Image (tube, rainbow, N blue to C red):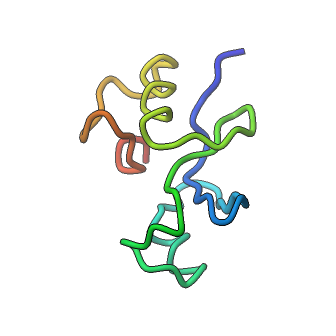
Amino acid sequence: MTELVSSAALLVDGEVHTEPPPARHGLLLRRLGIDRKSLEAVQGFVTSRGRFVDRVQAGEIALKAGQIQQLAFPPSLFTEDLW
């Protein structure tokens, strides 16, 4: 089964926070009360295999799976690339 990018996610203190699409990273940051430029949260995505991956890894997965044809801001994936 091909791994897909499923949802935006944040990794904060070893815990993954996510919401279903079309949730974006900004929404997750606001709900957690974290400033967008804060280094306490790693922005990434959860895959169809339940893995947290960073933006670069997510871009590679989405391209390989055919979810997108190109990245708007290489080498990173943004939710705007997907939904």
Q: Residue at x 65, y 37 (%)?
A: 47
> Against 69, is 48 above or below?
below
> Against 26, is 53 above or below?
above
50 and 14: which is toward the camera: 14
Quadrant of the rendering where the N terminus is positioned: top right
> Against 45, is 20 above or below?
below
Q: Residue furthest left?
A: 73
Residue 77 falls in image quadrant: top left
Q: Is residue 41 left or right of residue 19?
A: left
4 and 45: which is toward the camera: 45
Q: Is residue 16 left or right of residue 74?
A: right
Measured as percent of width and height from the top left, residue 44 is found at 52, 49
Q: Is residue 79 left or right of residue 21?
A: left
Residue 28 falls in image quadrant: bottom right
Q: Residue at x 73, y 61 (%)?
A: 15
Q: Residue at x 42, y 50 (%)?
A: 79
Q: Residue furthest bottom?
A: 33
35 and 68: which is toward the camera: 35
Measured as percent of width and height from the top left, residue 63 is found at 42, 22
Q: Is residue 79 left or right of residue 15?
A: left
Measured as percent of width and height from the top left, residue 72 is found at 25, 39
Measured as percent of width and height from the top left, residue 11 is found at 62, 58
Image mark count:
0
